[in-house]
Image (spheres, rainbow, N blue to C red):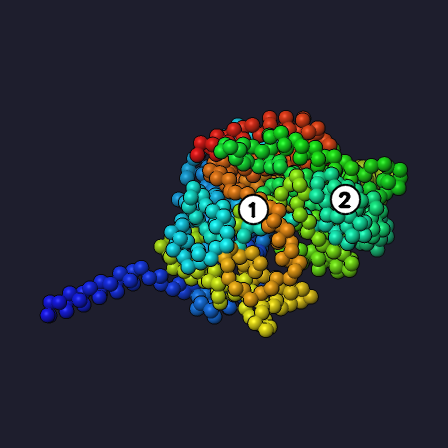
Amino acid sequence: MTRSRFVAAFGVLLMLSTMAAFAQTKPKSIKLMVDGTFQVKENGEQALVDGFKALSGIDLVLNHPIHNEYYTKVDLAFATGDIPEILLLGGNNYIKYAQAGMLVDVTDLYNKSAFKKNIKDPGVIEAVKLKGKLYGIPLERGNGTVTYVRGDWLEKLGLKAPATYAEFLDMLRAFKNKNPDGLTPDQVIPITAAGLVNSDPSAPMDMYLREFYQDANPDFFQVAGKWVDGFSLPNMEGALDRMRLAYSEGLIDKEIITNKTSTARDKWNSGKVGVFNYWAGQWNQNLQLNLAANVPQGKVTPIPAIKEAKYIERPATVYAITQKNAKNAPSLFKYWYEFVLDGGKGQTWASFGTEGIFHKVVDGKLQWLPSIQDPKKPFTKAIITAETPVNKWNSRYDAPELIDKSLAVFQANSVAYGLIPFSEEAMELVPDLNQIRTKYVSKIVFGELSVKDGLAAYAKETAKYTRIILKELNSK
Amino acid sequence: MTQRPTRNLGRKLYADRMYYLMFLPVMVFALVFSYAPMAGVALAFTKFKSTSVDGPEWIGFDNFENLFVGIKSDLFWGSFANTITLSVANLVLATILSVVIALLLNELVSRKGRSFIQTVIYLPHFMSWVVVASIFTIVLSPSDGFINNLLKGLGAKDSIYFLADEGWWTPVYLFINRWKETGWGTIIYLAALTTISPEQYEAAMVDGAGRFRQMLVITLPALSTTILIVFILNLGKVLNIFESVFVLQNPLVYDTSDVLTTFAYRVGFKDGNYALGTAIDLFKSFIGLILVLSTDAINRKIRGSSVL
């Protein structure tokens, strides 16, 4: 009897100690590195941190650089050893750190997670896998850009949304030459963008000017299982020719090369621009509010992609756990990912911020409150974009029709781009190569080089880069 | 009986102790902020990226080999040539224009007028390069910029995209630089002009020299040492052009505008290859040192004295 009691007590002790070993101890704090998609200091950052502490009992220690310096600071954080526990990574930067073994493989944790069963589109998760492994979890879809046109101009001109490239050009010509607001052709910018090639490394190079790029992609992609340099394919010639002709006809913004994203937006807001390809969703509302401030009758209308083109959904940005903190990975996973995708209080905090500061509840529905930075406009997000979470949940929120419509147009007309599994050595060459690509697109479109001469010069100048990169990509 | 030199030195140091005490903060500042960071140049001889888990790895001159003859050599030598062209042109223009404007200001009789002009030409120096770039992007805009409107008014058919035209970019860059910095550059020359004795001008007037002749035979020779010192001091930092280029460049003018500092920034900070970025910057500093030493050597040959 005594012996059996002893065995039972020993068994219980063994069980408890095993449970203790596997239990995720609650961290006192989580060191998080985020970009400008997390609310900035001037717009309620501290309220979000306080809200997290109140709900979880955990301090959120933020490293929150300004948006356009984010990846420079991420590199510095890794180089100096001041590495966060969890950080936001997108595009090539995600690949770089995952390939270098600096991020924790969270595939198993994801597979065992409570939120996995609620993932709306498993394709979004698959798109950020590298060699079948997950090194980060997206909280929202990658999203992409949609073409916005001045809906009021279309109506006044009696035009329908263009369905083909020819109709698209006719619309640009009509905006310029028969402008319904009485602007002279010199004053109208039929279409604008921040450059002829997108330079944001977390998004595809051909994301803007979709009507001109159509099926051409100046980056690397796979054709029948083999990686190729899209810039050297015949369809790139067509894309360059279209841009070149449209530019020489005055349909593309004369200053497109010197435009920054903010400049292009300002031009749109001024009411002189007819077409602007920009982020789907909340940006529809922002563009509408900003345009209406200058042109009260102005209407920002997202249009379906023309027959020859598709919009592009970029691979989602992910939150990744750093290898330096691998031993705490289960605990970090539980208290961050499981929390912000819990479909309840945690996700409400991550999507809508703290109640009373970011949102209020009216008749059981969530409504945004005026933003702290600009009280004339409502808050639109906390951390996760409320309209595009990766999981299904009852948010008790009805998005404005404008946002829903632009997302619906985008999702019905987009294709998803995948990640390019560059090696570390290849990654080092990519920024130089992209700069050369941008240079040649610009020179060809501006008429400094013919399409043929430009492509030949490109091939010559980049041969040593593309040879190395393609050899590496195709050897995998 | 002769005293030991160390004793002498000790006495001298003790006698001048208050001066040394005053110098101490400057020395500490220089050591901490100028000399200590120089240890970082060792990175140029290592492999060190943001993904280097084990820290820098010693690789000798491999980074320089990569720059001089490796895959990045075209971009490196292109940016080197641009650096030399833009820097030297900028330095020569800066020296000539600053001296000329200082001389012209010196000739102004009205004190109020002189103060007003000085204030106006000093102001651009205090503007950030981002603001200056925005101003000139607007002024030179091919759509509705002031200059293109003016040209159209004068009968020009097509507008000129000054900032995106390789032929125009360098002259425009130099003009913007001079617009911003020439006024500030006159300060030292104006100070030097006040040290010239008025008696020399009076004597020259008695000898029948006009104002232009006085400028040639009195003012310019009196300024020559200052001009040379300022030239050599500026030569030391002449290759450090970054902000002005960075805010004014665009894809159409990369071939003429990419300089060593923008290249180093891109490689070092944007791509996270700190070792290669350091190697580019170390090479730039080495060229700067050669420029300063050779200019001083030429000066020593011509004038028989060194300014270093």
* Rendered residue at 81%/52% (across/down): A156
| Label ID, residue A171 | 2
Tag 1: amino acid: Arg
* Rendered residue at 61%/49% (across/down): A412
Kindly state the secondary structure of the residue where label 2 is placed: helix
Residue B85's spot in the image, x, y percent? 67, 33
Residue B299's spot in the image, x, y percent? 65, 33
Question: Which quadrant is the C terminus of chain A positioned in?
Answer: top left
* Rendered residue at 13%/67% (across/down): A4
Most extreme residue toward the bottom is A363
**Relative to the observer, which residue lies in front, A348 or B82?**
A348
Crowding near the residue tagged with mark 2, few <14, some 14–19, many ≥20 C-alpha atoms within 10 Å: many
* Rendered residue at 55%/43% (across/down): A417
Chain letter belonging to callout 1: A
Q: Is residue A60 above or below residue A423?
A: below
| Label ID, residue A314 | 1
Residue A37's spot in the image, x, y percent? 57, 56
**Relative to the observer, which residue lies in front, A122 or B103?**
A122
Q: Is residue A130 above or below residue A362?
A: above
Q: Is residue A445 visible?
A: no
Q: Is residue A288 visible?
A: yes
Image quadrant in which you'd find residue A309:
top right
Q: Is residue A4 above or below residue A192?
A: below
